[in-house]
Amino acid sequence: MNRWFMMMGVLWLSVSFSAYSFAGDATPQEVIQKVNEAIEYISKNGDKVLPEFNDINGKWAWGGTYVFIMKCENTALATHPVSPKLIGRDLSSLKDQNGNYFFSQMCEVAKNPKGGWIEYLWPKPGEEKPSRKISFCKSIPGMPYQPGAGIYDNTISIEELNKLLK
C-alpha cells in the first residue's frame, strides 16, 4: 500500500511540474545563493515563514526551479511549491531509475557544514524519459530543516559543483 502511495506521489509530482514554467535558466551559483538566503530567512524568522516556500509564484521560485524544505529527521518534505501532496510523507524509499535513494542522499550531503550536491535521474516537466538533475541541500543550524533546490544539467560534475561551495 505504501508503494502505491509513493507511485501516486511521483505521478502527481510529474503532472504538477508540467503546470510550472521551467525555463531552465537558473545556474548552480543561483541555487547555492537562494538556498543560503532561505537558511538566513528561516533562521531569523522561524517556522512561521515555511508556508511562503509553497508559493510557486513567490520569491523562492525562479529560473525554472524553486527552494524546497526537507525535514531529514523523518526524510519528509516540509514544503514543496509544486507538489504539496508530498509534504510530510516519508520519502526515504523513493529512488530514481538507477536505484539512487536521492532524498536520503540529499539529507546526507546536507549534514556537511557547506552543504552539498547530488545527482539523480528525474523526468523534466512534460517528459517521460528521465534526465540528469542536480540538487544542492544544506542544513539550518539549530533547526530540523534542510533547504534545497535543483536544476537539470548534463555538463557539470558533482566535483565541480562542490568546488563552488565556500
Image: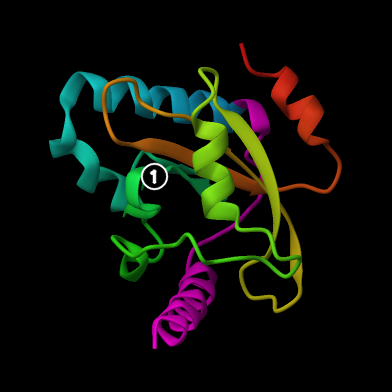
* Viewer-proximal residue among 88 and 149: 88
Q: Please check the rendered image and state whether residue 8 is part of the magenta-colored stretch, yes or no.
A: yes
Residue depicted at 66% across the width and 34% down the height: 27
Percent across and percent down for residue 41 are 28, 24
Q: Is residue 109 above or below residue 51?
A: above
Q: Is residue 129 above or below residue 163?
A: below
Helix, strand or loop: magenta stretch: helix
Q: Would you name the residue on which mark 1 appears?
A: 72
The residue positioned farthest toward the left in the image shown: 48
Residue depicted at 51% across the width and 66% down the height: 93
Percent across and percent down for residue 73 are 34, 44
What are the residue bounds of the magenta stretch?
A: 1-29
Q: Is residue 136 above or below residue 37?
A: below
Q: How is colour applied across the structure in the image?
A: rainbow
Percent across and percent down for residue 107 are 49, 41
**Horizontally, is 113 left or right of 157 in the view?**
left
Task: Residue 63: tell me if it is visible.
Answer: no
